[in-house]
Amino acid sequence: MRRFFIIWFIITFLCVIVRIFGGEICVVPSSSMEPTILVGDWLWIDKLTYGARLPARWSDIPLINVFTWNTTLRQKDGRINWGYHRVGGVRNPRVSDIIVFNSPERPDILLVKRVAGIISAGDTVTFNEKTYLSLKKILDNEYASSFVRKKKIYINGRADSSYQVKQNYYFVLGDNASESYDSRSFGYLPESSVVGKVDRVLFSIDPDCSKFCRFRFLRLFHHLL
């Protein structure tokens, strides 16, 4: 019995390590990335390429997060923030990469889109009256106060039309533009929201197929372009 618990503990520990640092599986419920990614595709989220995000609170740690199902503990955990930290990866996201990230408006939901544009850390972003609202979220994300008064833009209390960003930002789009909720709605995505990279379908189940076998054999380990 003791040996069983030791083996169970080791397997559980390894699963948690893989989930945090290696990757995880997710299923696609929407058509926003068709025809590249289909509804019912099961994807592997690669966390090694960009480097894994470290947990920011207890609820971010697999298995341990079951304790936050308790209302009181969940409320206490919601006030915890260990900050944003990421393990060094092979490279940063590039244009045309397909990435998975936390929704800016509902962080508990994961979205998958393609990178269409990049603002790199250290780049200077220039603001004007037309672009201010679309780029303001970048300032908000970096805790820089800003407002417009008499057609002038004020950043951190000074009239200024430019700002040097501290982290990478990505403009992401769905391949199925007419059905996609993406950066056209929520603006640039901060690097801290990126979970990982997707380049392969593990397997796929057709949810609309009424036949006995709904398994899409041609999608098995299908490489995404």
Image (cartoon, grey):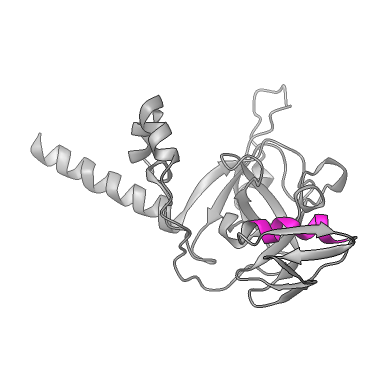
Q: Nearer the viewer, residue 71 or 15?
A: 71
Residue positioned 81% across, 64% down in the render: 153
Q: Nearer the viewer, residue 49 or 7?
A: 49
Residue 194 visible to the viewer: no
User: In terms of image quadrants, where is residue 97?
Assistant: bottom right
Residue 136 forms part of the magenta stretch: yes
Residue 71 image point, x, y percent: 41, 25
Residue 38 image point, x, y percent: 72, 42
Q: How many numbered marks, from 0 up?
A: 0
Residue positioned 22% across, 43% down in the render: 9
User: In terms of image quadrants, where is residue 98?
Assistant: bottom right
Residue 170 visible to the viewer: yes
Q: Furthest residue to the left? A: 2
* Quadrant holding the C terminus: bottom right
* 156 relative to 68, above or below: below
Decide if residue 44 is on the left or right side of residue 74: right
Q: Nearer the viewer, residue 88 or 200?
A: 88
Residue bounds of the magenta highlight: 131-140
